[in-house]
């Protein structure tokens, strides 16, 4: 595996290799030098590759990040036999089972020029079909070859290395390949962030940074704008896009990145989706079906207002996925879905699954494109960006070579929180552009052009199932969200639908269910909904009713009760006033909607009293829909009016008293007259004997 070339021969190789691409390479900025901290371990890594594929007999250029304190070291490339299967290729990416050695080439580190960034620039030619040339890598035919790139001592001890998957393609003079079909690659980009505003309404600095030209989302938009020939499918979060458009009006940097995003969104397929990123299985399991529907509807409205009527509502990228999600989206007229490969039950096959299929749950069927987890994983990792890009493109080339004469396609899905290095984006997009084995398409094009997978030619379409999933609890409960909706609706009746505080409350309801909150999502969701409670509390505290120690006096059967209400909100407010009393009736009704201009307002309620006395009157003030209680109090009502029944009773009592006194007076007169007559006609009483005292 280690080259046996002499130092003189190695130098000749270096000079010859440099001449291979002399017309294509810029002149090096400075001679070779040794880098790295004194005593640090020597390392070599891929800093760049001029092309993702090489024609048979052609050449390629490596840019290498070499950190070495010893200029006597050398760089060696060792080619191994071509890959024959996807599984063996996966092993080579880990540096395992590289296969037999075809041959090495090497060059002294001191003889390798450096560019202005300090990278070692090494131009390598392939052997091709001509006579053996020791300065060329012994690779003669098409295929994907594992090539070890080593930093080693002159005697052959390897100090640092990596494996470069080299894609070699047989290209005709007119630029065509022997393949009848290119592998379709549908690359899906979720341009999504957590909600852009904090609970106090100010922009979240982390989101603003992400949207800027150097931020993780901004640089994705900029990279796509510079590669218009690469077709992609975009799944932007409507909230992210809406905030981006708003913030860019006052931030020149965001204006630049948003302009790039707008150009890309106008040129590619754009999927509709919920207003904020959601874990739909979690929400459905918690009874938040209504929230899912509201998020989907509002998200579509926002995207349509920003981008026009171009939004694809029939294809969905659900993110987290289960059977209930499929059924819910199918009910929303979604008939095509992009499914992460790790959400699907594995399917045994000699070839990489590279065709759409039918996805079934609870009797519902949709056409689905599953992504390849092995390919998706290469978008992230610890390897240098240039190497990861080449590994991913080489993986796609291996899939293409599995069945080069069949129409096949794969999906590639970026992670939702993907933060790609600029070098990775550049390498991937330039590698896909004009690749002889690959063709970038959007999801709908792939689904239109590639037939459904079948187990055998002419057989029934493959039906796949989802893996089981236990969704986590959502950040809000159904009760919390319903209460918040009610408060916002009530606040709108008080303040007007276009009031900034009402709009902030509506936004809180829309963003609270998101799965994009960092850390404890429940705590952040509560903070959002607390905005609504605070707005209600502040507003209703400025509307005051009479104090409870007030007494209102009624002097007639039908009267009008005056009530003075104080409005200190600074605006005209319409409220609902409700009165209740066991002793009063209300001919015009107990409830009335009243318009309160700023400051105090006195209103009169028509009442009828059944009699005299003192009794309580309850007063309640609410929003016009009754959802928000504003205030309540109890005042005393004293009635001095004597009603019909009372008057009859009073007159009756007076007549009774008069008759009683008359009867009593006449009885006494008769008694007085009878007493003298009885004395004149009767015998005198006998004397009473009294004993003398001793």
Image (cartoon, rainbow, N blue to C red):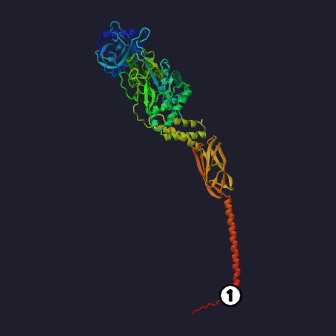
Does 257 appear above or below 619? Answer: above
Q: Who's the residue at 66% across and 46% down the image?
A: 601
Does 158 appear above or below 497? Answer: above
Which is more toward the observer, 684 or 348? 348
- Taking the image as shown, residue 257 lies to the left or right of residue 62, namely right
Q: Secondary structure at mark 1?
A: loop
- Taking the image as shown, residue 438 lies to the left or right of residue 559, namely left
Query: Can I make out residue 286 in this image?
Result: yes
Does 689 appear above or below 546? Answer: below
Which is more toward the observer, 39 or 495? 495
Task: Give the residue at mark 1.
Answer: 682
User: Of all residues shown, which one is farthest toward the top?
Assistant: 131
Q: Quadrant of the C terminus?
A: bottom right
Q: Number of labelled discs?
A: 1
Give percent across and percent down for residue 544: 61, 47
Which is more toward the observer, 402 or 79? 402
- Taking the image as shown, residue 559 lies to the left or right of residue 264, namely right
Q: Quadrant of the N terminus?
A: top left
Query: Can I make out residue 60 in this image?
Result: no
Give percent across and percent down for residue 133: 33, 8
Does 138 appear above or below 89? Answer: above
Give percent across and percent down for residue 160: 33, 20
- Taking the image as shown, residue 603 lies to the left or right of residue 231, namely right
Q: Residues within 10 Å of mark 1 (few under 14, many from 20)?
A: few
Quadrant of the image occupied by residue 430 = top left
Give percent across and percent down for residue 105: 33, 12
């Amino acid at each position: 595996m280690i080259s046996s070339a002499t130092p003189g021969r190695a130098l000749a190789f270096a000079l010859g290799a440099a001449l291979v691409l002399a017309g294509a390479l810029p002149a090096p900025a400075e001679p070779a030098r040794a880098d790295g901290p004194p005593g640090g371990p020597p390392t070599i890594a891929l800093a760049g590759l001029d092309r993702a594929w090489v024609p048979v007999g052609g050449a390629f250029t490596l840019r290498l990040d070499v950190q070495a304190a010893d200029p006597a070291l050398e760089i060696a490339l060792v080619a191994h036999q071509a890959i024959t299967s996807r599984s063996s290729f996966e092993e080579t990416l880990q540096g395992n089972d590289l296969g037999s050695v075809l041959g090495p080439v090497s060059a002294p580190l001191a003889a390798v020029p450096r560019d202005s960034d300090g990278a070692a620039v090494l131009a390598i030619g392939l052997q091709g079909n001509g006579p053996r040339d020791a300065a060329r890598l012994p690779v003669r035919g098409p295929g994907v070859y594992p090539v070890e790139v080593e930093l080693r001592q002159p005697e052959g001890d390897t100090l640092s290395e990596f494996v470069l998957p080299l894609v070699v393609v047989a290209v005709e003079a007119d630029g065509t390949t022997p393949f009848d079909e290119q592998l379709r690659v549908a690359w899906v980009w979720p341009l999504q962030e957590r909600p852009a505003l904090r609970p106090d309404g100010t922009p979240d600095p982390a989101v603003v940074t992400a949207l800027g030209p150097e931020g993780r989302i901004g640089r994705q938009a900029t990279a796509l704008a510079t590669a218009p020939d690469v077709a992609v499918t975009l799944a932007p979060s409507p909230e992210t896009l809406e905030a981006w458009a708003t913030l860019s009006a006052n931030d020149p940097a965001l204006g630049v990145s948003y302009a790039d995003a707008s150009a890309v969104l106008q040129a590619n397929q754009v999927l509709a989706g919920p207003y904020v990123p959601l874990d739909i299985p979690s929400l459905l399991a918690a009874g938040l079906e209504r929230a899912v529907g509201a998020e989907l509807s509002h998200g579509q409205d926002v995207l349509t207002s920003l981008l026009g009527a171009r939004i694809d509502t029939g294809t969905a990228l659900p993110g987290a996925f289960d059977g209930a999600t499929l059924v819910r989206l199918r009910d929303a007229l979604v008939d095509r879905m992009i499914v992460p490969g790790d959400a699907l039950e594995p399917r045994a096959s000699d070839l990489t699954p590279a065709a759409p299929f039918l996805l079934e749950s609870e009797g519902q069927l949709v056409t689905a494109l599953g992504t390849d987890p092995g390919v998706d994983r290469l978008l992230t990792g610890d390897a240098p960006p240039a190497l990861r890009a080449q590994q991913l493109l080489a993986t796609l080339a291996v899939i293409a070579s599995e069945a080069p004469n069949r129409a096949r396609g794969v999906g590639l899905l970026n992670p939702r929180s993907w933060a790609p290095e600029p070098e990775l984006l550049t390498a991937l997009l330039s590698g896909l552009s004009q690749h002889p084995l690959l063709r970038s398409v959007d999801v709908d094009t792939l689904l239109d052009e590639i037939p459904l997978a079948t187990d055998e030619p002419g057989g029934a379409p493959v039906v796949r199932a989802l893996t089981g999933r236990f969704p986590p609890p959502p950040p809000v409960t159904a009760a919390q969200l319903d209460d918040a909706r009610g408060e916002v609706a009530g606040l709108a009746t008080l303040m007007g639908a276009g009031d900034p505080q009402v709009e902030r409350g509506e936004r809180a309801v829309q963003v609270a269910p998101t799965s994009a909150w960092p850390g404890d999502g429940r705590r952040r969701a509560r903070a959002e909904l607390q905005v609504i409670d605070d707005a209600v509390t502040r507003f209703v505290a400025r509307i005051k009713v009479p104090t409870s120690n007030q007494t209102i006096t009624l002097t007639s059967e039908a009267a009008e009760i005056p009530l003075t209400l104080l409005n200190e909100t600074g605006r005209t407010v319409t409220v609902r006033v409700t009165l209740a009393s066991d002793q009063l009736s209300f001919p015009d009704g107990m409830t009335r909607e009243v318009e309160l201009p700023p400051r105090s307002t006195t209103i009169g309620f028509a009442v009828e009293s059944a009699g005299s006395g003192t009794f309580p009157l309850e007063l309640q003030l609410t929003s016009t829909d009754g959802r928000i209680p504003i205030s309540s109090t109890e005042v005393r009502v004293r009635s001095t009016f004597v009603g019909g029944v009372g008057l009859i009773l009073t007159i009756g009592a007076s007549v009774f008293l008069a008759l009683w006194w008359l009867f009593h007076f006449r009885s006494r007169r008769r008694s007085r007259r009878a007493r003298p007559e009885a004395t004149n006609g009767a015998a005198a009483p006998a004397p009473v004997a009294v004993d003398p005292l001793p």
